Amino acid sequence: MPRTYGTTHSSMAEFNRSRIVQILHTQGTRSRAQLARQLHLTPAAITKITANLIEANIIEETGAIDGLMQRRSIGLQLNNQAWHVIGIKIARSSVTLAIFDVRGQIQHQHTIEHIHESDVQDICQTIKTAVFTMLQNDPSIKAIGIAVPGPYLRNEGRIALATSVSGWQSINFKSEFAQSFPVPTLIEHDARAGAVAQSLFGTFENLPDTSPSTHGSHTIKQANTNYLAYYLLGEGVGLGIISDGILLSGTLGTSTELGHVSIDVHGRPCECGNYGCLETYCSAAAVHQTMMNHSSYFLKHYQVDPQTLTHEQAASWLIAHYPSDDSCITDIMTSAYEAIAYGCVSIINAFNPSIIVLGDTLAQGGDALLSTITHICKQRVLPELWQSTHIVTSHLHVDATLLGAGAIATQELLAHPSSVMQHP
């Protein structure tokens, strides 16, 4: 996301370092001459800046590449293995920690599962212990990103509401984690972190054309990721929006809280105090609850006890058995997929993104889910808006929220390379 820099010599130097590392991150290997031309800087300035970055082990020279005017030049690239970040995904009933390189490739992953109300404070200490061990074992770790459920009050550092495991509401994440480690530590709402991951690491080429006149018969080359929505369908429901390249957050940091938008004012009561919230119909927790309401049926016909499953396990089991001739499974999943589709209608009408990326547990629905979304959106969205919107499931190699935690840390390093230099 765009950053604001001052006009002092040091701030302009940081700005130019950032521009160079971001080009190398998004475009790959470049020569000094190519960088000078692209950034409208003199060759002497580029040589000085890149020498500084090489000395700091942030970038490195490669072999000769084809440069300008077909001349062979020495290439420059990011030193991926010298830059590692920790990503931490805090879900309602689990926590996952991972180490990523600057390209988003996972190096190590560890999950703490089956978290209950009484465990939350102890889990925070467990997270700290794990992070300090990672830092000790891997000195290339330069930043930490933490993704938390919403609504997350960014300025205060706490979650306003954590359905299912409300104990997380007692934690102030800023005071608990932000200053606890010797490297920069950033905290972000889970769906917004997922949006950053999609923007930084996602690929959106050869997407099907949604125009009714083409019936999907041809493709477009690439969606505009400056207008991207990440629709999180996990234990809760969340939304991250990038509009004109800016990650939307709102006055308190709780904007785009789609999970608590009512789709039925007379519907199911929600822990937030509202009725008919989207999250009560299509989250993993919601479909698990519906499955538990029919526990005896699943025990009798499938020898599966929903009471023993986690939210994710229950949702994944239902997805794997749908479509089905079983009316109970069909009713549960059809209702959930239709609710997800109505969420897409709201996203398109409210934010007009170029692409909506579905991620987390319920996004495993694949073609059956996308078919339901397409059917409902064609009925309920203006044709002009529908034709300009592309809806896909996440193709990231790692859970988007976990990678998003790593992505916000990576983004910080790309925007402020001096933070890497200060933590050798």
Image (spheres, rainbow, N blue to C red):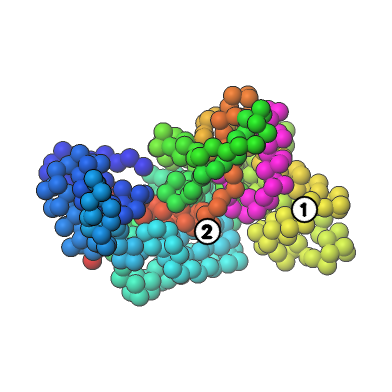
Q: Main secondary structure of the magenta part?
A: helix
Mark 1 or 2: the one toward you: 2
Of the numbered discs 1 and 2, the one sitting upstream in the chain is: 1
Figure check: 192 above or below 145: above
Figure check: 47 above or below 101: above
Q: Position of residue 59 (x, y in %)?
A: 26, 59
State left or right for residue 328 relative to residue 77: right
What kind of element bears circle 1? Answer: loop
Residue type pointed to by label 2: His
Residue under label 1: 322
Figure check: 210 above or below 127: above
Residue found 19% across the figure and 54% down from its top: 50
Q: Position of residue 244 (x, y in %)?
A: 41, 33
Q: Nearer the viewer, residue 163 or 341?
A: 341
Q: Nearer the viewer, residue 234 or 253?
A: 234
Q: Which numbered marker is on residue 397? A: 2
Q: Is residue 10 visible?
A: no
State left or right for residue 361 relative to residue 137: right
Q: Quadrant of the C terminus?
A: bottom left
Residue found 41% across the figure and 45% down from its top: 154
What kind of element bears circle 2? Answer: loop
Figure check: 389 above or below 313: above
Q: Nearer the viewer, residue 312 or 180?
A: 312
Q: Is residue 42 visible?
A: yes
Q: Quadrant of the N terminus?
A: top left
Q: Position of residue 165 (x, y in %)?
A: 59, 56
Assess disc 1: are there few (<14), some (14-19) or many (≥20) residues with their C-alpha within 10 Å of its C-alpha: some
Magenta range: 357-380
Q: Which numbered marker is on residue 400? A: none
Distance (Cα) linking label 1 and label 2: 24 Å
Residue found 68% across the figure and 39% down from its top: 373
